[in-house]
Image (cartoon, helix red, strand yellow):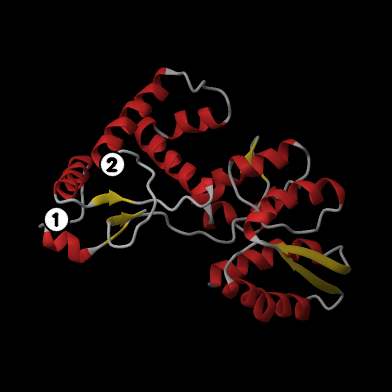
Amino acid sequence: MKIFLSVLSIMMLSFSITFAGTLKVTNNSSNVDNHKLWKETIIPTFEKENPDIKVEMTIYDHEAYKTQIRNFLPAEPPDVVNWFSGNRMKFFVNQGLFEDVSDVWDQNNLHNELAAARSTMTVDGKQWGVPTTYYQWGFYYRKDIFAKYGLGEPRSMADLMNIFETLKKNGVTPIAIGTKYLWTAAGWFDFLNLRINGYDFHMALMDGEISYEDQGWIVYLMSGVKLQKAVTTSIITHLIPGKKVWLP
């Protein structure tokens, strides 16, 4: 929490030196606790330290925001926006819609404090945003079902494949993925491709430097087919309570 607040203060403080009036900020978090944090802690603290600035925060629906930001950024952009890092950030950087904030990184030791996230905020050697939140992606599993079939947490791909086969033999579909929104399925493509083909290949693929017909991509497809056969008739399945044990 301390790092989260300090990063936001740094991000907003860059306006306080030469800015007075209303500072417009967007928030697309679907977490009401995040909204509360901004309303009750972040904004009041910032306004107390910068009495000439009034912060106006607009909260958007998380999914609708992905379309709305494309409309308001070129027309009436706010001062601070929440958005995604990496390639999705680069899309707006390339259109000249985001500001270079490398000076914020330089002046606040962020190159060291946030070294793990710096590459995701960097385009052409410059930083175009400051990370404020993160969350994990992983598997949640049913301990009771694992115990029933004598299974443990996998330490290798071979362990994972053995779990899939054991569960299938006992009539349990191993994996369910919630795909109400397609990005959740696409996220698993990222993770599989990163681990099968490596970071450099994945980034080159995302930047259009490598074709989806490249040999490395074929390797990924073959691995995906192997996983698909081990899991079910379709690697992306609908969640049915009581029928599936793994929920990534």
Q: Position of residue 175 (x, y in %)?
A: 31, 50
Q: Position of residue 187 (x, y in %)?
A: 47, 45
Residue ID at (56%, 48%): 118
Quadrant of residue 230 in the image?
top left
Question: Looking at numbered disc 1 in the image, what kind of residue is underneath it?
Answer: Leu
Quadrant of residue 231 in the image?
top left
Question: Looking at numbered disc 2 in the image, what kind of residue is underneath it?
Answer: Thr
Quadrant of residue 152 in the image?
bottom left
Q: Position of residue 127 (x, y in %)?
A: 65, 46
Q: In the figure, 61 relative to 125: above or below?
A: below
* Callout 1 secondary element: loop
| In the image: residue 192, left or right of residue 49 | left
Of label 2 and label 1, which has the lower sequence position?
Answer: 1
Residue ID at (80%, 64%): 24
- Judging depth in this view, the residue of 240 and 204 nearest the camera is 240
Decide: few, some or many residues near mark 2? Use Cα within 10 Å; few <14, some 14-19, many ≥20: some
Q: Position of residue 192 (x, y in %)?
A: 38, 38
Of all residues shown, which one is farthest toward the left?
150
Q: Which mark is residue 198?
A: none
| In the image: residue 223, left or right of residue 167 | right
Residue ID at (22%, 52%): 172
Q: In the figure, 232 relative to 49: above or below?
A: above
Q: Which mark is residue 151?
A: 1
Q: Which residue is mark 2?
A: 232
* Callout 2 secondary element: loop
For the residues labelled 2 and 1, say whether their Cβ atoms are less than 8 Å apart.
no
Decide: few, some or many residues near mark 1? Use Cα within 10 Å; few <14, some 14-19, many ≥20: some
